[in-house]
Amino acid sequence: MQTVQDAPALRAAIRGWRSKGQTVGFVPTMGNLHAGHQSLIKLARARTDRVVASVFVNPTQFGPHEDFERYPRTLLQDQTALTDEGCDLLFAPEVATIYPYGAGHSVSLHVPQITDTLEGAQRPGHFDGVATVVCKLFNLVQPDLAVFGQKDFQQLKVIERMVRDLSLPLKVMAAPTLRADDGLALSSRNQYLSVAERARAPLIHDTLLKMRELLAKGHAWRALEQVAAARLLRAGFVPDYAVIRCAEDLAEPADGRREGLIALIAARLGSTRLIDNLMFD
Ligand code: PAF
């Protein structure tokens, strides 16, 4: 696998493939890759001739008091994991390549409505940073297909809307969430958890399952949100939200609606913020 840091080298490699009529799949990441990321590479690998991954810890999507500085940077291990997965090229740019005028002076994209709620409300500016960097990466890589994990469900919706609204010529694919045996969704942030916190963390997935079970038994979604938040609080989590929403736009469901719903939770456990979700199919 080739690793490149700058745009001309990236474009040259992709031009070479394109000249042979090959298709390009893309998996953008912030590195510290785990089995969840590897499954995204696999999905791209199965659908396109060439696969590009990016590793870039994007400063504009972190709030001032978030974990940008301590976000794990593990490029050597990431290179090994990507090579093992059959990735063709790793793009690992410097901040100045992505933000030539500085991260604070960049053109910024705002995807309206869908970003007003949940993560968008808890982390002001977060999705502007995500949309901006992903659009820049799409411009650089110009993929036919880009794969994103469903664990960051709202992010996936933001990207889908951006691609459609800006008429970007690529397909966005959603990849299922990978979980540990006890149900905890794989995430680079899980490694911040202490041993005791790690043992409690699966309660998030368990609570999502409970919400689904109780909704199927006829409970009203509003009541279930309270049940879920209380359950998390009792176990020592500080929930930011535990909600049931319409999967297509994350709006509150009409009373009695049972189809196309999703439960989403964000909760702090000690100093770690965990998110997860579950579709109610
Ligand atoms: O999900 C992530 O890792 C990041 O938000 C992304 C999509 C790579 C943009 O920085």
Image: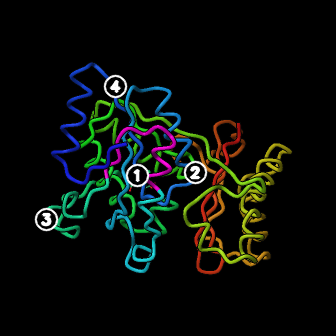
Where, by quadrant of the figure, is residue 49 drawn? top left
Residue 47: which numbered mark, if any?
none
Which is nearer the N-term, disc 4 or disc 2? 4
Secondary-structure class at tag 4: loop
Quadrant containing ligand 1: bottom left
Q: Which residue is disc 2 drawn over?
A: 151
Point out residue 155 in the picture as x, y percentages from the top left corner. 46, 51
Q: Which residue is disc 4 drawn over?
A: 23
Q: Which residue is disc 3 drawn over?
A: 101
Mark 2 vs mark 1, CA separation in Å: 20 Å
> Mark 1: is the Cβ under 8 angstroms from ligand 1?
no
Position of residue 264 relative to residue 260, above or below, is below
Q: Which residue is disc 1 drawn over?
A: 113
Which is nearer the N-term, disc 3 or disc 4? 4
- For the magenta stretch, what is the residue range? 78-91
79 part of magenta stretch:
yes
Specify few, some or many for label 2: CA neighbours under 10 Å numbering under 14, 14-19, or 20 or more.
many
Which is nearer the N-term, disc 2 or disc 1? 1
- Check contact, mark 3 vs mark 4: CB within 8 A: no
Between 239 and 75, the one nearer to me in the picture: 75
Mark 2 vs mark 3, CA separation in Å: 32 Å
Between 269 and 212, the one nearer to me in the picture: 269
Query: Closer to us: mark 4 or mark 2?
Result: 4
Residue at 37 percent of width and 64 percent of height: 61
Residue at 79 percent of width and 76 percent of height: 234
Point out residue 6 in the picture as x, y percentages from the top left corner. 20, 52
Where, by quadrant of the figure, is residue 110 drawn? bottom left
Instruction: Give amino acid for label 1.
Output: Gln
- Check contact, mark 3 vs mark 1: CB within 8 A: no
